[in-house]
Image: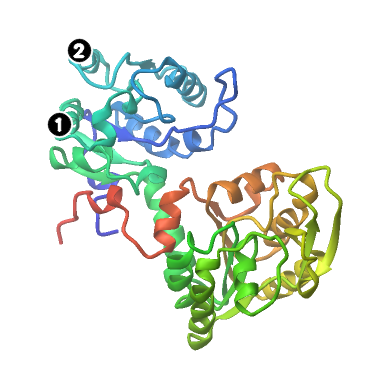
Amino acid sequence: MKKLFIKDLAVRKKKVMVRTDYNVPLDEDGNITDDTRIRATLPTINYLLDEEAKVIIASHLGRPVGANPKYSLKPVARRLQRFLTEKVKITLAEDCIGEEVKKQVEAMNYGDVLLLENLRFHPGEQKNDAGFAKELAGLCDLFVQDAFGNCHRNHASMVGIVRYVPAAAGFLIKKELDYFEKSVNDPIRPVIAILGGSKVSDKIKILENLAKKMDKIIIGGAMAFTFLKAQGIPVGKSLVEDSMIETANNLMDYTKKNGTKLYLPVDFVVAEKFDKTAETKVVPFQEIPERWIALDIGPATIKLFSAVLQDAKTILWNGPMGAFEIDAFSRGTYAMVDIVTSSHASTVVGGGDTDMAFHKAGKAHEVSFISTGGGAFLKLLEGGDLPGIASLTDKKI
């Protein structure tokens, strides 16, 4: 890394602010349903506690308008306490800036944790307001960035704060970047990308970038229908981006010129309507009925994709193979989960829906790495920079 890493900082007996992404899912009663993002930050927090720092944690949750108690970080404070020893005192501040918060920071013992209340209760956070950023910086001696899932945002606690305090990457950021580097920029070959989801327009830059770097690209999900229609194949009432047909043709030519093999589904599960009660059947890709919708890849495609992945040494996956939220259209995605987890390849998974599929299948622990970032992971796949990382303090050569 060209940026400062947490181990480059003299954190012992210092006030250290850690920006985390604790934007965790909650049920109707405000209970956390998935604490992956909290657990992912524990190496950074424990390192600072071992160094007897005052640990000040800053995060957002949801998209509140003003100080809405529904989006309080109280559930996060309770869950975080479970993961730390009883000797570590965790306090939830009533706000994230202001005189009272300053007093709380000064009153902390070294080795304590203060979790600031939701940053987005203040409009200055998302506006990257300099005054708000300066107030946050005034609470600490050093800043550690560990909110990978939010690193594509130009927010005050992501980029504004680093103008006023030395800033370094935490263990989670380093892990995310290391795995991305190994899977995209310096992979063990053959390296294969699996791309799903609904829109080609969302993945154009990703496809263009990966076409230069992958040996093979598998395309599933509704994206596939734009590519099929671009070849003159009728796709019934399946989701197609007509404005992207020329782009799809260009992308197919582009992959061919770059020597990257592109694979599309050869059969589909189709239904008369997008409904869990709808009649379904499996048809070859050339035989999608005129008034039917294709909503998942079929068994022949699963066999094809399995064969394509057989020699993989590195697999990168973003996007489901179908509408897996409905059971009748989930088999393709879950079959691919089985194929990927049973391979001997290094496997990196990113994106909220794909992440969810592995967790629902109970196989999240069987992949090499699941990214904690949706939008940030996609930005990296496009070959772009992340403001939350680019703004960190450079290492001195």
The N terminus lies in which quarter of the figure? Answer: bottom left
Query: Residue 37: horizontal and vertical position, in percent?
Result: 48, 37
Is residue 186 shown to the viewer in this render? no
Query: Residue 222: horizontal and vertical position, in percent?
Result: 63, 60
Q: Please name the colour scheme applied to the rendered image.
A: rainbow
Circle 2: is it few (<14), some (14-19), or many (20+) Cα within 10 Å?
A: few
User: Which one is nearer the viewer's eye here, 364 or 383?
Assistant: 383
The answer to whether residue 97 is above or below residue 233 is above
The answer to whether residue 89 is above or below residue 293 is above
Name the N-terminal-most of marks 1 and 2. 2
| Eye-nearest disc, 1 or 2 | 1
* 6 sits left or right of 348 in the view: left
Residue position for label 1: 134
Residue position for label 2: 103
Q: Identity of the amino acid at label 1?
A: Lys
The answer to whether residue 317 is above or below residue 82 is below
User: Which one is nearer the viewer's eye here, 53 or 158?
Assistant: 158
Identity of the residue drawn at 53% across and 37% down:
36
Q: Identity of the amino acid at label 2?
A: Lys
Please tell me how many numbered marks the rendered image carries: 2
